[in-house]
Structures are given as structure tokens and as C-alpha cells.
Image: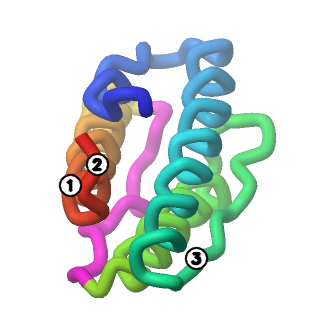
């Protein structure tokens, strides 16, 4: 399983990097969902990220996926991941840092390393 801390370095205004993030995010959550299903018998819904443009709907899909994963693990929901403007460099950096940290929290709760 990829180390989600790598997501904290997604470069600003790099469309290819956003598409790469969307793909690894999806695959990472599939692996996490399989682990959660095997250990708890619970599943969770993931939301498609599409073209990775960082729109409000895209941010909401990331938020909902993390909320669902946390619920399946029986842990607290993530912080707000949907109220960022990825066109601003500082918000872009904050968002990806926060997503990476929350993914590590989910991974640890699922017993993965």
C-alpha cells in the first residue's frame, strides 16, 4: 500500500499530478476497503474523483470517502476536507497535507502500515 504521506507533496496547478493523485487515492481506498471488510465485515462507499480538477464536487467526494471509511472503522470522522480553494497555493498545500494525515489515521486504525 502506498504511503499516503506522498500525497502531501502534490504540486500546485499541475493537472497531471492531480490525475495521478485521483488514481492512487482510488486504488489506496480499494485496498483499505478490502482490509476493513476482512477485519470488520463492514464496507464503505467511495466516490469517483473523475478528472481530478479539484472542484467543490471533487473536494466533497474526497470528504465523503473519508467520512465513510472512518464510519466503517468506528472512529471519528475526518476534519473538513471540502472547504478549500485549490487555486490558492496555501490552501492547496493545506488540503493535501490534511488528506495525507487523515489517510494515515485511517490506515493505522485499519491495522495497516
From which residue to which does the magenta span run?
75-87
- Using the image, tell me which numbered label, if any, was put on residue 27: none
Quadrant in which the N terminus appears: top left
Q: Mark 1 and mark 2 in contact (Cβ < 8 Å)?
A: yes
Left or right position of 52 against 100: right
Q: Would you name the residue on which mark 1 appears?
A: 108
Q: Main secondary structure of the magenta part?
A: loop
Choose the circle earlier in sequence order: 3 or 1.
3
Q: Would you name the residue on which mark 2 appears?
A: 112
Counting every numbered tag in the picture gives: 3
Name of the residue lying farthest toward the right:
50
Q: CA distance from mark 3 to mark 1?
A: 17 Å
SS type, badge 1: helix
What x and y, as percent, mark residue 54? 60, 41
Relative to 33, residue 39 above or below: below
Please tell me which residue is depicted at 34% across the width and 78% down the height of the picture: 73
Please tell me which residue is depicted at 35% across the width and 75% down the height of the picture: 70
SS type, badge 3: loop
Relative to 33, residue 91 above or below: above
CA neighbours of label 1 inside 10 A, class few (<14), some (14 to 19), many (20+) = few
Does the segment drawn in magenta span residue 40? no
What x and y, as percent, mark residue 72? 43, 82
Choose the circle earlier in sequence order: 2 or 3.
3
Q: Would you name the residue on which mark 3 appears?
A: 44
Does the segment drawn in magenta span residue 81? yes
What x and y, as percent, mark residue 48? 74, 55
CA neighbours of label 2 inside 10 A, class few (<14), some (14 to 19), many (20+) = few
Q: CA distance from mark 2 to mark 3?
A: 17 Å
Amino acid at each position: 500500500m502506498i504511503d499516503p504521506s506522498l500525497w502531501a507533496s502534490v504540486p500546485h496547478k499541475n493537472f497531471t499530478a492531480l490525475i495521478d493523485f485521483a488514481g492512487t487515492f482510488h486504488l489506496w481506498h480499494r485496498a483499505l476497503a478490502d482490509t476493513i471488510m476482512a477485519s470488520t465485515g463492514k464496507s464503505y462507499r467511495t466516490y469517483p474523483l473523475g478528472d481530478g480538477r479539484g472542484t467543490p464536487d471533487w473536494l466533497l467526494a474526497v470528504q465523503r470517502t473519508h467520512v465513510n471509511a472512518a464510519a466503517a472503522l468506528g472512529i471519528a470522522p475526518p476534519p473538513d476536507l471540502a472547504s478549500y480553494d485549490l487555486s490558492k497555493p496555501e490552501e492547496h498545500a493545506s488540503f493535501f497535507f490534511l488528506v495525507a494525515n487523515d489517510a494515515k489515521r485511517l490506515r493505522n486504525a485499519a491495522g495497516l502500515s
